[in-house]
Amino acid sequence: MERKPLDSLISKTGLWVSRNGHLHGIRSCETSQKNLRITMDCGDVIQVRNSRSSRAARSLRNHKYNKPCKKCRLAEEKIKDFSNKIARKDEVRVTVKTVQSAQFNPVKNDIPDTSVLSETLQPSNTIAKPHIHNSPEERKASADAQNVKPQPRPQQPKVTKPASRPFQKHAKPEKIEFTQTQKNRILSLLAPDEMISFSKEKRSFAEIESTLLTQRKKDLRMMYEDSRENMLGKLERTITEFFVDMGFLEVKSPILIPFEYMERMGVGEDKELSRQIFRVGDNMCLRPMLAPGLYNHLRKFDNVLPDPIRIFEIGPCYRKESDGNSHLEEFTMLNFCQMGSRCTRQTLESLIGDFLDFLGIEYDIVADSCMVYGDTIDIMHKNMELSSAVVGPIPMDMDWGVNKPWIGAGFGLERLLKAKNNFKNIKSVARSESYYNGVCTNL
């Protein structure tokens, strides 16, 4: 059974099983990158990790509970549907077929009719007297009658039945099995709008690969004839044009930064997050986010540019997190911020809304928190986090010499492409030598 994370199980069932085994209905579920904040129908609120192997995940996956919560007032149909999905591997189904009594006991047809026997064996009211043969002729005739042998029945010719053909079972076609290497190769050749079911596939690996290779070569030729623009580069240019038109100043900060910048961001060597940073020598590192550079620009532009100060940056970042289909070790970030007047949550949400509407991406806003900025606003597309936004000031500002209110947000461009074009794997739209605009180039 596939081990899905908690958010997928909750989205599918709409239920929650507490530690005491009570089954609750869910009013709302706020999802962050690692945690869930769940509000029950009864009013209880809990925060848990989005785990695949937790007690709650096992209970929802196996549909185990003691009794429903009385305060949640779950519908009987919902409880019954949840209970009926319990799968028992040791359960055996037996089909019972009803047959007629004549088929079940065919010997019964050989029993003579009892009504005939009753008439034959019915006792007579008169006693039969033995006949006495007086004359010799009568005695001789009686003896001859007793010695008469029965005549044999004439034999009927035997009829030979034609030999019946033995029942032949039609051989089932052999199920095609694919190795994991073959599956990975086929999946890498699929286009974003293509899907495949290995359990139902009747073609061989060679046939599937040949068909997909022909189609991918055709796709690359069409891209060369049409636009010849890389999707990631085109998106960066489009975003730059949008923010420049909105009155933001574009800046470019160094990729190689002092590790002391990360310590000022609260990510010292004693923090878990520091293990995800690419170190260069003893004192330098590759920037894992654009925020340190923006802090320096805000401080230097203060009292120089008109109020409010609005800046943005698009550039590469590096972080050791390549697990899953939504993480990359090298990715592209957009960070924008505004400092001074009108730095409210309403202004921030309005900017985010205008930006994502411009790109044509659906989103939801949920509250969250992180170790760097404290309380944050997460921008979600389905189950994928697109951005984390902050409304300042925050205590860390004093370490950078910033003493005015500010708002800001950071977006991963590869995730924006994945959400906009419904790509299955973020690696197909990243900086790569194996993909071009989501199409495999290992042909």
Image (tube, rainbow, N blue to C red):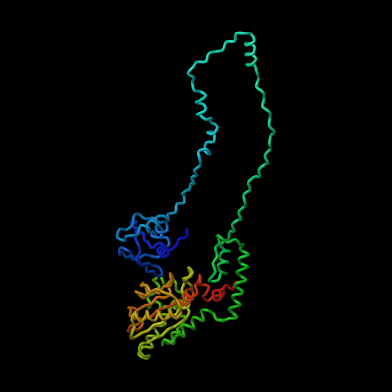
Q: Residue furthest right?
A: 157
Residue at point 54%, 34% (across, down): 109
The answer to whether residue 164 is left or right of residue 113 is right
Measured along the vertical axis of the image, is residue 246 above or below residue 215?
Answer: below
Tell me if residue 260 can be seen.
no
Q: Nearer the viewer, residue 391 or 211?
A: 211
Q: Quadrant of residue 287?
A: bottom left
Number of callouts:
0
Query: From the viewer's perspective, is residue 61 above or below residue 134?
Result: below
- Quadrant for the C terminus in the image: bottom right
Q: Return the x and y of residue 358 as percentages of the image width and height.
A: 44, 81
Mark yes or no: residue 436 visible. yes
In the image, residue 162 lies at what x, y percent?
A: 68, 41
Residue at the spot 43% in from the left edge and 70% down from the top edge: 382
* Image-based side of 152 in relation to 48, left or right: right
Front one among 334 and 269: 334
